[in-house]
Amino acid sequence: MSSPEEELPDVRASELATKSLEYLQSGRQDDAVRSLREALFLAPKNETVLAAFDSFQKDQAVHPLSKLCQKLVVEGDVSAGENALRLLRDPSSNFQTTTTTECIELLLAHAKNIPLPISGKVLGEILRTSRGGREHIADSVGENTKEMFETVAEIGGEAIDGLVVTLLDLAAWKSEAKKKRSMKDCFKLFLETLNTGSGEIEAWSTRSIARLLATHATELHSFIGQASLERILSMLDTRSPDDLRSHATLATARFVETDENIAGSMLGKFISSRLAADSDDDLRIAFSAAAAIFPLVPKAAAGLFLIEGFVEGLVPSLQGRPSDVEQAVLEMMSAACVDKGCRAAIATHCEAYLEAVIRGDENFKGIASTILAKVRYGGGDPGVAPKGIDELAAVFREMMLKDGAESRDSAMEGLAYATLKPSVKELLVKDKEFLQRLLETLRDSAGKPTVMYGGLTVVANLTGYLPSLSEEQKKVAQLRNYANSAPQAKLEPDPADKDEKVTMRCKVLLEAGVVPVLVACSKRVSPSAVAIMSSIFLSLSKNQKHRGLVAQQGGVRLLLQFYASASGDSEQDRKVKLSSSHALARVLVSTNPSHVFGSQLPVASAVRPLLALLESNEEQNDLLPVFESLLALTNIASTDDSTRDLIIRIGWPKIEETLLSNNIMVQRATMELLCNLMASPTGVAKFADGSKTASNRFHVLLALADAEDLATRRAAGGALAMLTEWDKACEAIVRREKGLDILLGMAIEDNEEMRHRGVVCVRNMVCQKPDYVERFRRKGAIDLIRDSLRGTRNPEVLQVGVEALKALMEG
């Protein structure tokens, strides 16, 4: 029989073991471990302690995600769901398929009575992050699409988003045929839900339809009938939330792109029926839809807009209507300005009304001013001042200075037109408060593509240089003026658009912080926005004094990003590649590479964009990009052998071609690049590997060392000074009839730099082989070098010259 003293530890250990299980159930893991450890120390063979230890081991085998989902489902613990979300979004988390499958089944089994919306968010996140989870759902959807769709829909919109991710993931399906069949079935169910649902259901149905159409419009568009399309179009209402309008617009766009003729007919029926109904709601929805579809099918939309009597009756039809109908009409007019005929119709029948709105309605002053700017300036000649553009610019400026973001946003599009006029550019760039608001609005334009595009266009207008016209282009412009019955039209640019004025505007914008704003805007931008930003950087980098600031504020990294993003072969992609690489070249001409590049941005990343500029040819009559690219390559070739070797490996054929250019500046720049490339053994081998090709290259190099242009001779001399350190190069020079004469000619030039290079070449050769000494002596090298040294006080030239003379006289 055990004594009371022996029973006491057992009792205490049992209490601690029981307590550890309570801690474990409540999620207090550390307290549970502490209590169980103490219990095991007191009574390691106690049955209660051993049972607690066994329970603890089983609990440890359960993944934390499973525990959290169980608490969410069984106890309705919302905080457990939030913790599950955090765990799912943690990049370091790892989930086995069995864990995610268990969690999915648990959530689906209790779909009718689990906390929302957190449960939907958890299920959606599981499907986004777990390949195994998507495979499991794909199997279930394939077996019974309708039942699974309805179950997931009960859990909410975020769960439906996860279902759409699964439908779009081909790898999650056992066969492509099963995926296609399930996607079509789900798409039809989304359309049915759209026609019967409202509120949140309407939102996630539209979002899902838009996402599926975005990638599979060809397969799915035939399921959209007139009723479904009208339901989608009704969500384009100005009263609809922005995200709903955005998804409805995307769905409409993809539907229209698939078959414009059918879509145009269906759109026409919808708008005509709403206009015929003539209620405030019907008119507002019709005008809102028309505004949204104009950019998608401008030809079909313009046909509806220009039907006899429509534009003429617009202004009278607004009599007695609420302001939201007027807003929809104004938005439609603004969108209609994309078409020349529509602009003319608005100018004829609506201009007086728009002017009245500007004078008397603060709410719609901005959009009315924008429409007038488009009507008066849209598609016109920027050199011709349209009626009232200065007054409209003043309205847009006033709107930009207001506190409301909405006011500033609506001013952007109008400013994009107003800043085409040179005098408006000069006026606005002198207004520091305006520029500050402009850049603030642009920086905050993420998620507002129209605002961002308008703001970028304004900056591009302010910074854009006029293209330089050749004499031939000027004659063509003169002939065009005659053809347009304007023979006296001036070919000279407006004084406000001359280069010095544009350079000043670029300086003001740089000092105002335009580069950091462009960097901030670049996170998520459309290809058209990238094209504008590339052109802005090309203008900002034109003046040498501006380039350091562009580089310092992140311009180089951004330009490399733009170049890489233009991976297609479209006209826009080609323009982005050209403008971004040209701007990059300009910046790197005037910037120390070590201040720009590092481990996070290797100098090698700039090589391909710069070499791409060498593809420009003389037939294009614009060799400036080629010239500036060569200068930039010369600069980065001064860094290290790996960069020099990369330039040689990728760009050597084009570099050789530009060396023979008829343009003296291009030839000089190429020779300077070659001089720097000679610091690499790979560069030396191109001239000194003993091959016939290398010998031919040497012939060209020696000829350029005797060229008329001093800078070209200087660069060729520098290359020869490095090449003559190699025996194969010396042999190639000796084989050339006038090789030694050219070196001696360099050594006796009046120019100190040329004299230095020549003396180095002679010293390198005579110190290498006795045979070379005799050859130089026969050329009178001793007297020539001695006379050359008498004419210099440069210590470096004197030192090298003495070494050469010593070798010549002792050899």
Image (tube, helix red, strand yellow):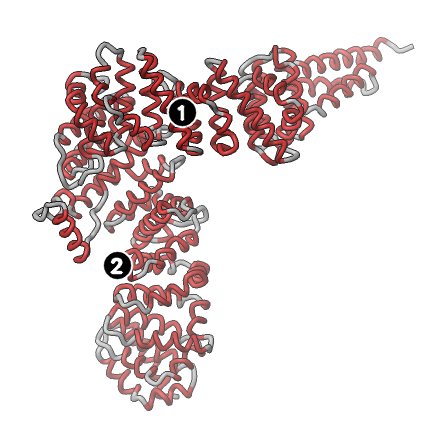
Residue 554 lies left or right of residue 420; in this view the side is: right
Depicted 708 relative to depicted 94: above or below? below
Give the secondary structure at mark 1: helix
Depicted 642 relative to depicted 4: above or below? below
Can residue 798 be seen in this snapshot? yes
In the picture of the structure, the residue carrying the numbered disc 1 is 266
- Which x, y percent locates residue 137? 63, 26
Nearer-the-camera pick, 510 or 38:
510
Q: Quadrant of the C terminus?
A: bottom left
CB-based contact (under 8 Å), mark 2 and mark 1: no
Nearer-the-camera pick, 744 or 106:
106
In the picture of the structure, the residue carrying the numbered disc 2 is 621
- Which x, y percent locates residue 546? 25, 47
Residue placed farthest to the left in the image? 488
Give residue 14's quadrant in the image. Answer: top right
Q: In percent of the image, x 89 and y 11: which residue is there?
A: 2
Give the secondary structure at mark 2: loop
Q: In percent of the image, x 38 and y 87: which residue is there?
A: 773
- Say which of marks 2 and 1 sits in front: 1
Q: Quadrant of the N terminus?
A: top right
Q: Amino acid at mark 1?
A: Met
Measure how far apart labels 2 and 1 are at the Cα level.
Answer: 50 Å
Give residue 687's quadrant in the image. Answer: bottom left
Depicted 810 relative to depicted 90: above or below? below
- Which x, y percent locates residue 597? 40, 50
Nearer-the-camera pick, 782 or 499:
499
The number of numbered discs placed on residues in the rendered structure image is 2
Q: In percent of the image, x 68 and y 23: which residue is there?
A: 102
